[in-house]
Image (tube, rainbow, N blue to C red):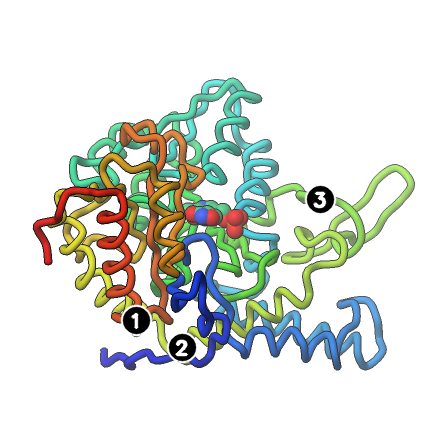
Amino acid sequence: MDTKVINVQADFPILNQQVNDERLVYLDNAATAQKPLVVTESLDKFYHTDNANVHRGVHTLAERATAAYEAARSKVKNFINANEAAEVIFTKGTTDGLNMLASTYGEQNIHEGDEIVISIMEHHSNLIPWQQLAIRKHATLKYIGLTAEGELDLVDAAAKITNRTKIVSIAHASNVMGTINPIKELANLAHEVGAIIIVDGAQAIPHIAVDVQKLDVDFYAFSGHKMMGPTGIGVLYGKHELLDQMNPYQFGGEMIDFVYQQKSTWTQLPWKFEAGTQNIAGAIGLGTAVDYLTDIGMESVAQHEQQIVDYLLPKLVADDAIEVYGPKNPQKHSGVIAFNLKGIHPHDLATALDMEGVAVRAGHHCAQPLMEYLGVVATARASFYLYNTKEDVDSFLNALTETKEFFNHGTSKAK
Ligand SMILES: Cc1ncc(COP(=O)(O)O)c(CN[C@@H]2CONC2=O)c1O
């Protein structure tokens, strides 16, 4: 499939600035992505011309706001190829969606002795909800390990997913290891034993095409802010029949059919899970981000990032002063690259890079069990998106060289 050359920096005014008298090079996209003008303009338009509460008013603005909100839902439905818009629940983000599942599906279906299987590379948002559920229910939480290459160990997965497993919950892409996990295979392993599969899609949905029906996942959670949408909006996709069985997550306006003094009945999907006034503007902004990505094409986004990784990763791997985590093969590594400069604390490294205008993340990345598994306390992390360029990569590499010299570090082999 032919892909467009991506040249979108002009859509992101935030990128056109100096930091510490150097050109900003923003490489912290795994934390949050920058927003194109069309997204912020869609928020302005809503608040300046269409703002009203949704689903309840019969006046013109309420109808316009409702139409825009539900149009956003339809855009997301098409973007992930859900079977119907009712399977798209707006949430606050990935964390909210995963907690919703643990508090509803989990509470209703996990019992003493049952097993929940996740992986050691999970973000805390896809670890703690299951850990606390297992504690509450006297169930068992098991972790799938990694191969020597730093990928998910499918042999270990097959050994740990058994007829005692009720839930498998896995990141589609790691926010540390730069791996894309074999979700279709894991879905098959889960379904073969009668378990469901939940996917944390936070680091995948912005970067690769996701087809929830082709993957045959039961639930898929992601955040708007990582795919150039506003913060505070996200999506939980779920198969209709499973969402139907779940108790509401929160109670209040919007989500009811009828409220009597001593009992209440609930409305239909998706609104059963959208209690109270929702993040209407956020949903509209997310819908605009979906349009923006769809216009560019996810194939083009993926190829653009692959070109960056193909160019950068071998240089980092070849440098004896640098430890790279995750697969060393660029074809198996996403645009999230965790690394350390040997002997230098990642916070000091990130501070030094910031002095050169380069923004990377440093810390445990809300993946402390993974840090322990890797034998490190923290790492630095550079993460790329469609608006990053080869010039950004060269600036990053130059800043790394400057930083190594600043810390009087050994010279690297790679030039
Ligand atoms: C894999 C993964 N899952 C869940 C989350 C939680 O998403 P929300 O915060 O939107 O609910 C994140 C956030 N990524 C963190 C945030 O900052 N840096 C990171 O790597 C993530 O990377």
Q: Residues within 10 Å of mark 3 (few under 14, many from 20)?
A: some
Name the residue beneath numbered marker 3.
Answer: 250
Disc 1 beta carbon < 8 A from ligand 1? Answer: no
Q: CA distance from mark 1 to mark 2?
A: 9 Å
Q: Which callout, 1 or 3, points to the residue nearer the camera? A: 1
Three-letter amino acid code at the position of disc 3: Gln
Q: Residues within 10 Å of mark 1 (few under 14, many from 20)?
A: many
Name the one closer to the observer, 256 or 374.
Answer: 374
Secondary structure beneath dot 1 equals loop
Name the one closer to the observer, 170 or 167.
Answer: 170
Q: Is residue 10 above or below residue 262?
A: below
| Percent x, y of residue 330 | 17, 56
Residue 411: image tag: none
Three-letter amino acid code at the position of disc 1: Thr
Name the residue beneath numbered marker 1.
Answer: 389
| Percent x, y of residue 137 | 55, 21
Q: Is residue 388 above or below residue 355?
A: below
Q: Is residue 27 above or below residue 337?
A: below
